[in-house]
Structures are given as C-alpha cells and as structure tokens.
Amino acid sequence: MPRVRVKLVSWDEIVEWTMGLSKIIEESGWKPDVIVAVARGGYVPARLLCDFLDVTDLISVQSQHWVEAAIVAEKAILRYPYKVDMSDKRVLLVDDIVDTGESLILAREFITREWKPLELKIAALQWISPVAKMKPDYYLIDVKEWIWFQYPWTRLEDISQFITRIFREDERAREEITEDKLKELFIEWYGIHPSELSHYWKLALEKLQKKGTLKKTDKGFKLEKK
Ligand code: ADE
C-alpha cells in the first residue's frame, strides 16, 4: 500500500466524468443560466459543462484552500470578491471535488449574500462523503475513502510537491539520492510509476532545481532548502 492514496486522473476520464455529471443535471430538469467556476479546480469541469449543457455564460470566483497537494491548509479565503446582480439568474456553482467542502461553503455564502441569485445549485465531479461538510446538489462519484485525485490540470504542481515531500519526510532521502532511488521511493509513497507521468517527471525535477528546492549532485539529487 502506498503512503499517500493517489489516483492519477486522465483527460479522457475528466471528459467522461463531466459528461456523466451533465446527464444528471439534465435529467433533473433544471437548467442554469450562468455557470460559476470555483477557481482554479472548477475551471475545466465548468467549461465542459457549458459545452454539454449548452450554456454560454461562464464566470468564476476564487476560493483558495489547499496549499500543498494532499495536505490540508487551515482556512478557505475568497479572493477578488466582486459584486454582480444575479437576481434573475439560475446559477450553477461548479468545482472539481467536494473534500472538506469549506471552499464551496464559502463561495455559496458569498454568492447568496452578495449576488442574490434567483436560484443557486452546486455541482462537482466528486464528493468525499465521509469528510465533506456539505453535499452538492449534483455529483457523479461518491468517494467513500479519502484519496488524492491527481487531476491533469495540476500535474506539474502536484508531482513537484510529491517529490519535495519525499525529500522532506523520508529518512532515506536525507543525503543525496540517485534518480532511480527517487523513482523507487516515489512509487512506494504514491503508487504511481514515473513512466506514467511522461514529460511531467522531468519537468518537475527541472522546476524544483530552478526554484532552489533541489540541487543536482554527481550522484543524483539532494534537498537544498529545509
Ligand atoms: N482538492 C481538495 N481535495 C482534493 C482531493 N482529495 N483530490 C484532489 N484535489 C483536491
């Protein structure tokens, strides 16, 4: 068993899942006038929902919560709290996943209070039911056991953080290690083989060196910043 439960999600799965979600919304008989994507995770599902539900109006709000992949940050905050009149609009608020639900709760509160929509419903591809503090009106997958969904739009960011975490937390990466050893630890930690990540593996290592997190050595890599 890997230390961190991760599911690598493909672009094809995203299209398939969002199509499934759009069918559920359609079959409910409800149709939004405006879709509001929760930035940044809701962007791709929201854009695809516009396509599948034939909706032209797409805007967004930014609710930030997660700092590091698979590690919870303390609180969600709403960035750029602009105001618009939605009193004659049916609004669908869209995010990729409902984990704790805090960022969606915050976005819902803000939109209800400041935009006063005629109706507001919430949709997400996934709902982690055992930990979520809210249930979306529409969801496709009820996730029964917490897992980190490695979505294709955060691949570089997540892989970089996954690698950094090994260097920070694994005793075996205290000193410099070879790239092969790093790959071995990566598989052990996350259950993902770097060959599944195509160019992202190399890109993440380059990014971490550029940022000064990792240093290239004769043998391989070592952690630069503590
Ligand atoms: N964002 C918040 N929780 C998440 C999870 N479990 N997987 C992917 N992205 C997330």
Image: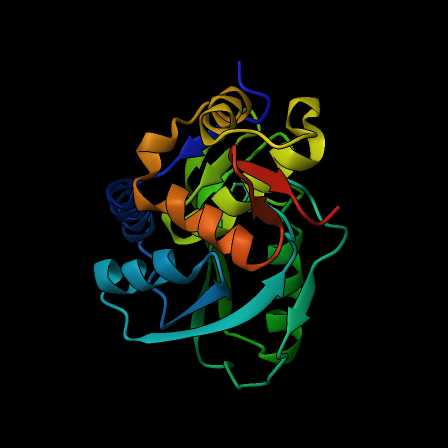
- The total of numbered circles placed on residues is 0
Q: Quadrant of ligand 1?
A: top right
The x and y percentages for residue 164 are 61, 41
Q: Is residue 26 left or right of residue 179?
A: left
The residue sitting at the top extreme is 1
> Where on the picture, by quarter, is residue 75?
bottom right
Q: Position of residue 77 (x, y in %)?
A: 70, 65
Report whether residue 124 is seen: no
Residue at the (58%, 79%) spot, across then down: 115
Left or right, 84 with respect to 154, comes to right
The part of the image, by quadrant, that contains residue 90 is bottom left
Can residue 73 be seen from the camera position used here?
yes
Residue 163 relative to residue 206: left or right: right
Horizontal and vertical percent position of residue 114: 64, 79
Q: Residue at x 55, y 35 (%)?
A: 128
- 68 vs 32: above or below: above
Is 15 above or below relative to 84? above
* Image coords of residue 44 (percent x, y): 36, 59
Q: Quadrant of residue 10?
A: top left
Q: Residue at the spot x=45%, y=81% of the render? A: 88
Figure colour scheme: rainbow
**Residue found at the far front of this picture:** 218
Residue at x 32% of width, y 64% of height = 47
Above or below — where is 106 with respect to 101? below
Residue 130 horizontal side relative to residue 125, left or right? right
